[in-house]
């Protein structure tokens, strides 16, 4: 659906700022794709290159086999109608009601009044605001304002939804309800959603894939369950440190015992693998930390434990875990 080929973006200045550095990335259609990184990593710039609100300094951006870089202003306006965008601070028109805000993009493209009313009412029902049709933004909560923003972004029936830190201004409970709405929209409308955030729980809650950015460079990309439970790059490991498992004190890392971090994915999270290991091998196992959670719909478990016993038995235990498809990281 979306392809970045060697995308670069440099902002002028003294010195110039290299916001994006050779980005090669594919975003599949019909999925929720997260882009995560710290402030200044280049997330917003990358997102805005999709609809050419930011034009790349180099490289190509393709959407549905259409090279966005080559479009004329007129062609670009037509393509942007197929892309909805949701903002962190809602960007609603305070002088317009909820109905008027959602209707605004339809009015711009000169849609008939009957079709506007039909479309707006349908969207307000979808986002759960049918009873707020005559309310003004000042009368709405933050979560309700964002739902209006989502309805407005869907007004022109886009095939792609771009979310720029859509939940950063919301409290945790409201964030969860907005994320559930985005997931519902993805499933019912088969809409591709590209979501940028610096919040790990947002990616964990609804994303199918994730790309990690740092200092304008792509660090790694893949299914969320793989990237979050088996991070390959130091930058991703730093971002995830302390999110799923606690920081490990130096005393434990320097222990004479063997310290392991274990990851159990999907059905392996339900199996008594550790008890089988202890029964089969003459070792002692001390569990230091444990957590069971899920990544979107996939369950996973994390375990920090230390093994003591003879080295041959410990090595056999580790091999047993790997044979049972447990991800094993030996920490000391």
Image (cartoon, helix red, strand yellow):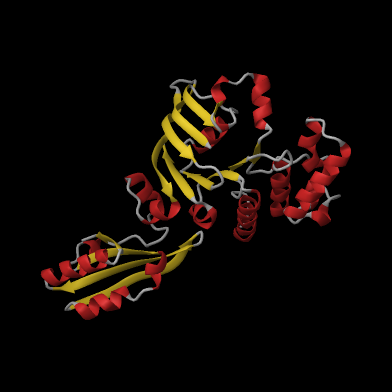
Q: x, y (%) of residue 174?
A: 64, 58
Where is residue 110, by image quadrant? top right
Q: Is residue 304 above or below residue 99?
A: below
Q: Which quadrant: the C terminus?
A: bottom left
Q: Position of residue 313 (x, y in %)?
A: 14, 72
Residue drawn where x is 69% and y is 46% of the image: 150
Quadrant housing residue 310: bottom left
Question: Left or right: 187 with respect to 34?
Answer: right
In this figure, what is the number of numbered marks? 0
Taking the spot 54% from the left edge, 22% from the top edge, the residue there is: 69
- Horizontal arrangement in the rendering, residue 12 relative to residue 146 (left or right): left
Q: Residue furthest right?
A: 114
Is residue 120 in sight in this rendering? yes
State the residue in front, 177 or 317: 317
Residue 300 image point, x, y percent? 41, 64
Q: Is residue 281 above or below residue 100?
A: below
């Amino acid at each position: 659906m979306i392809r970045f080929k060697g995308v670069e973006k440099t902002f002028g200045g003294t010195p110039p700022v290299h916001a994006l550095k050779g980005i090669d990335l594919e975003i599949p259609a019909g999925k929720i794709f997260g882009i995560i990184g710290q402030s200044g990593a280049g997330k917003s710039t990358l997102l805005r290159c999709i609809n050419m609100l930011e034009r790349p300094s180099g490289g190509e951006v393709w959407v549905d086999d259409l090279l966005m870089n080559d479009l004329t202003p007129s062609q670009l306006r037509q393509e942007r109608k197929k892309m909805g965008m949701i903002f962190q601070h809602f960007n609603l028109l305070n002088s317009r009601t909820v109905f008027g805000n959602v209707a605004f993009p339809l009015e711009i493209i000169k849609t008939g009044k009957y079709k506007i009313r039909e479309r707006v009412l349908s969207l307000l029902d979808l986002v759960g605001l049918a009873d707020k049709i005559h309310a003004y933004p000042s009368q709405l909560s933050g979560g309700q304002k964002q739902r209006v923003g989502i309805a407005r972004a869907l007004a022109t029936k886009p095939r792609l939804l771009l979310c720029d830190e859509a939940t950063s201004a919301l409290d945790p409970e409201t964030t969860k309800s907005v994320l559930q709405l985005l997931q519902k929209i993805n499933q019912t409308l088969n809409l591709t959603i590209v979501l940028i955030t610096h919040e790990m729980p947002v990616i964990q809650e609804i994303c199918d894939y994730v790309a990690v950015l740092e200092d304008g460079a792509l660090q790694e990309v893949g299914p969320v369950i793989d990237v979050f439970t088996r991070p390959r790059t130091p930058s991703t490991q730093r971002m995830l440190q302390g999110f799923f498992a606690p920081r490990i004190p130096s005393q434990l890392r320097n222990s004479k015992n063997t310290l392991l971090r274990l990851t159990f994915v999907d059905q392996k999270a339900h199996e008594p693998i550790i008890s089988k290991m202890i029964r089969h091998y003459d070792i002692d196992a001390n569990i230091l930390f444990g957590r069971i959670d899920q990544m979107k719909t996939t369950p996973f478990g994390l375990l920090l434990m230390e093994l003591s016993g003879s080295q041959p038995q410990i090595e056999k235990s580790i091999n047993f875990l790997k044979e049972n498809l447990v991800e094993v990281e030996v920490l000391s």
